Amino acid sequence: SSELTQDPAVSVALGQTVRITCQGDSLRSYYASWYQQKPGQAPVLVIYGKNNRPSGIPDRFSGSSSGNTASLTITGAQAEDEADYYCNSRDSSGNRNWVFGGGTKLTVL
Amino acid sequence: QVQLQESGPGLVKPSQTLSLTCTVSGGSISSGGYYWSWIRQHPGKGLEWIGYIYYSGSTYYNPSLKSRVTISVDTSKNQFSLKLSSVTAADTAVYYCARTLVVPAAHDYWGQGTLVTVSS
């Protein structure tokens, strides 16, 4: 399958923990990567692989995976975390395609 | 610090070919270990992977765009390019270039993006 499904919108109270999920058959074979995108800006990689953060990404961002579901967790959400979040993985159908989820709009209340 | 910068026309007429170039600085395309991707985002929509190229010239394209896409690399200029033929209004989007890791899979550096509008 070549689809990744995300909830369109999620909200979290300031300082609380939020989990953003991504579902798809390809996640049984490949880890998801996660991207944060703020209005008018390019996406920024925040999590990749089993649970790797690029340099400069706060440790409140973490990733996990189980079966066909990948999750991005923000522990102690900050106002600056309000953004769109996209998951991405390689397609497991053998055509070397890459697929993105539809994105989740995170609102920090 | 690797930086990528897209360049090319911001307006393309329907049925013509969209052409963009990505210039890489702070790292060499020829050093290997990475693929170089084009990704687009329709206005107000999500992200769509178009395809990528390795420094050797090997390419892989999104099956939905494969018949119209060509990605090439010029290692002497540290650039890679996108050509999308027979464009329509549906190809209006912000086009990003990015550096891509295959294992684990991730696009770790992105250009700022360039808006291409298809209109007569």
Image (cartoon, coloured by chain):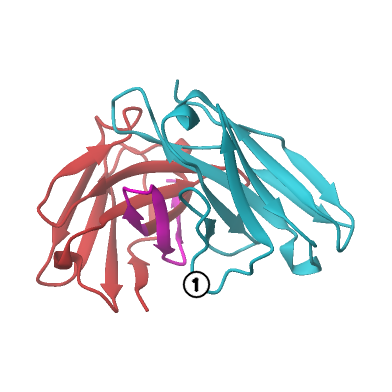
Chain colours: A cyan, B red
Q: Quadrant of the N terminus of chain B?
A: bottom left
Q: How many marks?
A: 1
Within 10 Å of the Cα at label 1, are there few (<14), some (14-19), or many (20+) other Cα atoms? few
Of residue B120 and residue A106, the one placed in the foreground of this image is A106
Of residue A39 and residue B14, the one placed in the foreground of this image is A39
Magenta stretch: dominant SS?
strand
Percent across and percent down for residue A8 are: 72, 37
Q: Does residue B5 appear left or right of residue B60 in this picture?
A: right
Q: Does residue A22 appear left or right of residue B56 in this picture?
A: right
A46 within the magenta span: no
**Which residue appears at 63% of the width and 46% of the height?**
B44
Which residue matches tag 1?
A55
Point out the stretch of residues depicted in magenta: B98-120
**Which residue appears at 13% of the width and 63% of the height?**
B74
Tag 1: amino acid: Ser
B113 within the magenta span: yes
Percent across and percent down for residue A26 are: 45, 28
Residue B98 found in image quarter: bottom left
Residue at disc 1, secondary structure: loop
Percent across and percent down for residue B91 are: 43, 41
Percent across and percent down for residue B52 are: 27, 47
Q: Chain of mark 1?
A: A
Q: Does residue B75 appear left or right of residue B37 in this picture?
A: left
